[in-house]
Structures are given as structure tokens and as C-alpha cells.
Image (cartoon, rainbow, N blue to C red):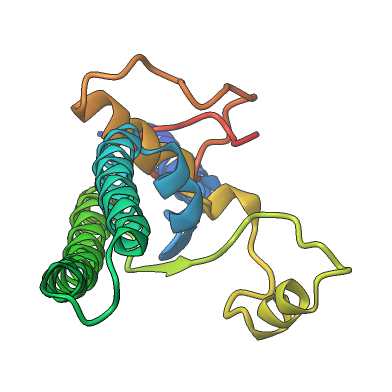
Amino acid sequence: MNHRLFFQVALATGIVACLASSAAAQAPAPPSVAIIDMTYIFEKHPGFQARRDQLRGLVEQAENDVKGRQEELKKLVDRLSDYNPGTPEYKQLEEEITKRDADLKVKVQLSKKEFLLQEAKMYYTVYQEIADETRMYAERAGIQLVLRFNGDQIDTNNPQEVLKELNKAVVYSNPSIDITPIVLQQIERRQGQPAATTGARPVQQVPGAPGAAPRRQ
């Protein structure tokens, strides 16, 4: 190889290396931190809505049962006027009313406890589903940390909402690191829901991360 050819090869190799280095420098690096609106996903989660509606139906059935028993008690109380106080009939009916009333109060307390327990388990189950989907996406995208945030607009006339806004952990975040729509779509696809059921907006790609989702409405 003569000196001219060697110089041309070396020059071409150097140009290719420089171009590759420049392209690598310009390529956006995957974000190491992302944010997710858990409240929004809970509201749009198809499985959560179905479970909540089912639990709500059970609560309504229990409330109707209690109302029916209360009506029966009221009728028994009205019957007391048919007897003179102190008579065996009056005492017997009064004891029955007292027993039914006590049983009903115990039933109501146990039902409330059971429904609160079911509700807590329901929320925890759905939370775990969201957390698992978030973890799987974060591992694929090379994201090291996912923070919770709330994307809702606050009512400045509501002191509680203002206080929550002042105490929130995330003060500013670039919209491109919001993975809420991506995680929600993964959950919807896993549960056989149509794509983009949450209302599509122009796609906002997370730089350097796999997958994309419409921004939220």
C-alpha cells in the first residue's frame, strides 16, 4: 500500500469514526427518571372500575337489607301500643324488639368492616397491577426511578387542594418523561381493551425509551 492510498484509507476511517461519534452524541439518552399519575390510572383502569361497581352493588344490597329490617322493627314498635305496659305480651314484644335491634346493629358493624376490608384489598390488587406494569416498562426503557405525581388542575378556591399542591414532591417535570399513558395502555392491552380508550392526543415519545402513548386529556 503506497503512502497516498494509506492516507486515503486512514482519512476515510477517521471521517466514519467522527460521524459515528457525532450521531451517538446527538442521540437522546434514555431518561433515568420518569413520573406517573397513579390517580389517573386508577380512574381509567377498566378492571378497577368493574370491581368498584361490583362492590358498590353489594353495598347497595346490604343497605336495602338493613332498611327492610329497620322497617320491620318500626312495625314491631308500633305494635307495642296494642298492649298495656307490664303485660306479658308487652314484655315479650319489647324483648323481641330489643334483640332484633341489637342483632341489626352488630350486622351493620360487621358488614361495614367487611366492605372496608374488601375495598382495601381491591385497591391494593389494582395498585400492584399498576406497579408491576410500571416496573416492566421501566426495566425495558432503562428507567432507574419512577416518581408519583398528580396531573390534575387544582382549584385555588379549595384550601385542601392548594395545600396538597404546595406539599407535592414533584415541582417540575418535562412532559416527555410522563409514562402514565404508556402504562395505562399496557394495562388495557393486557385486559383485552381496545387501544387508546383514554382519548388520543398527538403521540409524545419518551426520548430513548421503547413504546409510545398518546398524551392524556
Q: Classify residue 104 by image quadrant.
A: bottom left
For image coordinates 54% across by 29% down, the residue present is 214
Q: Classify residue 54 by image quadrant.
A: top left
Visible residue check, residue 18: no
**Rendered-image quadrant of the C terminus:** top right
Q: Residue furthest top?
A: 194
For image coordinates 62% across by 79% down, the residue present is 168
Q: Classify residue 93 by image quadrant.
A: bottom left
> Is 200 placed left or right of 11 in the picture?
right
For image coordinates 25% across by 45% down, the residue present is 65
For image coordinates 64% across by 64% down, the residue present is 173
Visible residue check, residue 66: yes
- Could you say where residue 77 lies in the image, as x and y percent from the top left? 33, 62
- Could you say where residue 106 lies in the image, as x and y percent from the top left? 17, 73
> Is 71 placed left or right of 181 in the picture?
left
- Could you say where residue 113 lies in the image, as x and y percent from the top left? 20, 70
> Is 158 placed left or right of 143 in the picture?
right
Query: Up-down: is 58 above or below 117?
Result: above
Asked whether 74 or 113 is in front, the reply is 74
Query: Up-down: is 156 above or below 20?
Result: below
Q: Residue furthest right?
A: 157
Asked whether 101 or 51 is in front, the reply is 101
**Rendered-image quadrant of the N terminus:** top left
Asked whether 111 or 9 is in front, the reply is 111
Asked whether 6 or 127 is in front, the reply is 127
> Is 111 placed left or right of 171 in the picture?
left
- Could you say where residue 148 lies in the image, as x and y percent from the top left? 47, 67
